[in-house]
Image (cartoon, grey):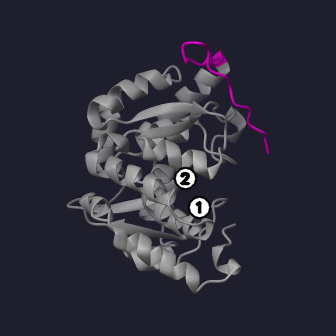
């Protein structure tokens, strides 16, 4: 598969994307805007409307940040592809979401080795306009910085099954709020309509014991009833629970493919 190369921002923090890269963005966003209809949750759709993402070009971080700051005090910052976990957690703790400064190539629209700018702008940023969600993500970053590496691995499962691959019950049925799903054409459909995956009611203990794969469509999802459930997770009890779990685990419990 292709090795993605991050682009460097100029002195003003802007990135000069090529015509080909902007065209790829247009293909992705126009396709996904259709796919998320009747599948994305209302909070996401409201955030997406507020962001008013352009369809003919990749937006700059400053454009996204201006909306996020006005909504929840968040911003996005360009980073070089995958960054160290400590840097990732520090950014989240400071209400900054990292955005990789590259976009996938047109021949690989549906597979990513690493999260790209479409995944982060289209998948995650709309939800960062929601206060409960935004506060939860900051809480996650703050607390991930305070625990051991093994405890961070367990907390990674909480992030994975909420921020990345979470579902939510609504009056219209299950809807998606996880950015990893909403930025994927295939998984947006699969997560709600396939009979293959298991869908569990939200259960922190079950999540913390659930391994996952990042290189394939998920085999299970967890469903919350309201975004305030994420806000209510902001408690020291969860951190103490995670640290207690670490004492009774072996290295093999932390292997995530």
Task: Identify the image quadrant of the N terminus.
Answer: top right
Q: Are marks 1 and 2 in contact (CB under 8 Å)?
A: yes
Name the quadrant of the C terminus.
bottom right
Q: Residue at x 36, y 42 (%)?
A: 128
Q: CA distance from mark 1 to mark 2?
A: 8 Å
SS under mark 1: loop
Question: Which secondary structure, mark 2?
Answer: helix
In the displayed image of the protein, which residue is found farthest to the left? 171
Q: Quadrant of residue 129?
A: top left
In the rendered structure, which segment of residues is drawn in magenta? Answer: 1-19
Nearer the camera: disc 1 or disc 2:
1
- Residue 9 in percent (x, y) is at 62, 20
Identified at 68% across, 72% down, the residue is 255
Q: Is residue 173 left or right of residue 241?
A: left
Q: Determine the main secondary structure of the stretch shown in magenta.
A: loop
Q: Is residue 3 magenta?
A: yes
* Residue located beneath label 2 in the image: 186
At which x and y percent is residue 199? 42, 73
Residue 87 in percent (x, y) is at: 59, 45
Residue extending furthest bottom? Answer: 248
Q: Which residue is mark 1?
A: 217
User: Badge 1, how many Cα within 10 Å: few under 14, some, many 20+?
Assistant: some
């Amino acid at each position: 598969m292709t090795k993605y190369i991050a682009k460097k921002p100029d002195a003003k923090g802007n990135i000069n994307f090529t015509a080909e890269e902007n065209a790829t963005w247009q293909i992705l966003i126009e396709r996904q805007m259709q796919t998320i209809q009747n599948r994305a949750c209302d909070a996401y759709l409201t955030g997406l409307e507020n962001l008013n993402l352009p369809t003919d070009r990749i937006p700059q971080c400053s454009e996204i940040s201006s909306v996020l700051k006005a909504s929840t005090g968040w911003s996005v910052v360009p980073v070089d592809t995958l960054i160290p976990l400590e840097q990732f957690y520090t950014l989240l703790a400071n209400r900054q979401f990292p955005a990789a400064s590259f976009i996938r190539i047109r021949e690989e629209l549906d597979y990513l080795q690493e999260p790209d700018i479409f995944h982060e702008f289209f998948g995650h940023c709309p939800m960062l306009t929601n206060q409960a969600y935004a506060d939860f993500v900051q809480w996650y970053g703050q607390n991930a910085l305070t625990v051991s590496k093994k405890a961070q691995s367990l907390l990674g499962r909480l992030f994975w099954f909420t921020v990345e691959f979470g579902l939510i019950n609504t009056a219209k049925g299950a809807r998606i709020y996880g950015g990893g799903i909403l930025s994927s054409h295939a998984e947006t459909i699969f997560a709600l309509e396939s009979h293959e995956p298991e869908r569990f009611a939200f259960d922190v203990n079950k999540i913390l014991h659930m391994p996952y794969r990042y290189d394939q469509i998920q085999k299970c999802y967890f469903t919350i009833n309201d975004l305030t459930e994420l806000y209510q997770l902001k408690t020291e009890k969860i951190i103490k629970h995670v640290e207690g779990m670490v004492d009774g685990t072996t290295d093999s419990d932390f292997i995530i493919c």
